[in-house]
Image: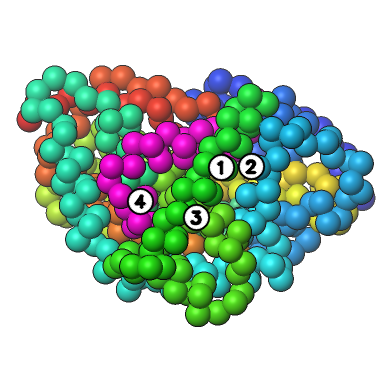
Amino acid sequence: MAAPRQTVFRPLDPAFLEDPYPIYARLREQHPVAWGATQAVGYAGFWFISRYADVAAGLKDNRFGREIAKVMSPDSFPPIPEAHKPLYAMLSDWMLFKDPPEHARLRRIAAPVFSLRAVLGMRPRIDALIDAALARIPERGTYDIVSDFSSPLSIDIVADLMGVPEKDHPLVRGWVREITLSLDLVRTPERIAAGSRRASELIAYFERLVAAHRKVPQDNLLSLLISAHDGGTFLNEHELLASCVLFLFAGHEASSLLIGNGLRALASHPEQWRRLCAGEASAKSAVSELLRYDSPQQIAFRHALEDVTFQGAAIRKGQTVGFGLGSANRDPSVFPDADVLDLQRQENRHLAFGAGMHTCAGSSLANLEAELVFTALAKRFPELRVESHQRQESILVRGLTQLTLRCDR
Ligand code: HEM
């Protein structure tokens, strides 16, 4: 018989936000499918899946999906306020929120744009943006490496590759941040309304940019995207514009959080930082381990599209299920000494980019960007000294809003 629902953890508790890993360990051992209660807007709570094998299997199981509106009656949802509608209209065109067969149609656009070959071709631009960001780090004193380096840099890189001219980078950064805030579980109605305004502005912005690129194609990802779109007829114009915003949104936050989380982890493991600086650990294996050790996206959310019994738990149609990527990545049945940071770890099959059909479409770009950034920072900071940090309030992603480093060499 399926086990009854019982609240086992509270993912918005400050102790959980600061360090969820001991709680994940308890859940993996005692409650591999646990009910977590939240006060978040629109979520009474969710089922949390903590073991690696279950997370990997669940994300490939089509009984869990995104398009809950297809299986529930319309009166199960509160009406959407007028001011929130532009945001939801845009999200409904994102592959991230689609199930088969629509998902595959929308995702086709990503393949040529984010192929390793295309991304490697963009490397000189990425190098130039990283160099410009490094040049802004002062020689002495303290510096907030998250607000002043990783956050603007990660938006600038993806914005640049998406054809946004440099003069507009600060503007686009602000819009993207507001959309990000409107989508997190700790959002408020005001944040959703602000995100909605920005969604309309970004769509209009890309409409102009796409028109300009159609007239004069450039050597960037936006032109690749447009030619993939115009060469086939699988996306309509709205979907093309919404995909541009998705790439900006999906491409910046996790990349930025990885830099902050990684630097903080390395500052408390100086022998590992020394190995990276000395070239004993390659940037590639270091980035995989940092992604595993403190994953930027902790949870991949889905809904049960039918009643499902999963590892003994009765999950009802419509309920939210959180697949714990961060917990899976610390599962000792897959990773020996899972709580140890080891930049030279072998066979690192982490799930930081998710699993199944929604596996990160930009992982080649994310890996390359992080490898270049950590290599550059290892040269700039022979020693890593953290003065203070501030954590972002979120359960979907995990990261810092501030990480102040001492800059003196
Ligand atoms: C360290 C950096 C990154 C991490 C950790 C990361 C992680 C993820 C994860 C976990 C998912 C799956 C979400 C789910 O299943 O619910 C995802 C999806 C996605 N990511 Fe990334 N991502 C990163 C960077 C990027 C970049 C640089 C881009 C592109 C510019 C990108 C584009 C996407 C897209 C388009 C999707 C949706 C794929 C789909 O629904 O089929 N990501 N990412």
Q: Where does label 3 land, which residue? A: 207
Instruction: Tell which tag, 1 or 3, sits nearer the viewer.
Output: 3
Mark 2 Cα shell of 10 Å, populated few (<14), some (14-19), many (≥20): many
Q: Where is residue 5 in the image (x, y as percent from the top left)?
A: 84, 37
Tell me the residue that label 4 is attached to.
164
Q: Do the residues labelled 2 and 3 touch (CB within 8 Å)?
A: no
The disc placed on residue 199 is 1
Residue 236 image point, x, y percent: 62, 67
First to last magenta residue range: 159-188
Are the two marked residues, 3 and 4, in contact with CB atoms closer than 8 angstroms? no
Kind of residue at disc 4:
Val
Residues tagged 4 and 1 counted as in contact (Cβ below 8 A): no
First in sequence: mark 1 vs mark 3:
1
Image-based side of 269 in relation to 113, left or right:
left
The reply to whether residue 248 is in sight is yes
Q: Distance between the residues labelled 1 and 2?
A: 6 Å
Label 3 SS: helix
What is the secondary structure assignment of the residue under circle 2?
Answer: helix
Q: Residue at x 49, y 62 (%)?
A: 361
Asked whether mark 4 and ligand 1 are closer than 8 Å, the reply comes as: no
Q: Kindly state the secondary structure of the residue where label 1 is placed.
A: helix
In the rendered structure, which amino acid carries the disc numbered 3? Glu
How many labels, in total? Answer: 4
Image coordinates for residue 274, horizontal then vertical, percent: 16, 42
Which residue position is annotated with label 2?
87
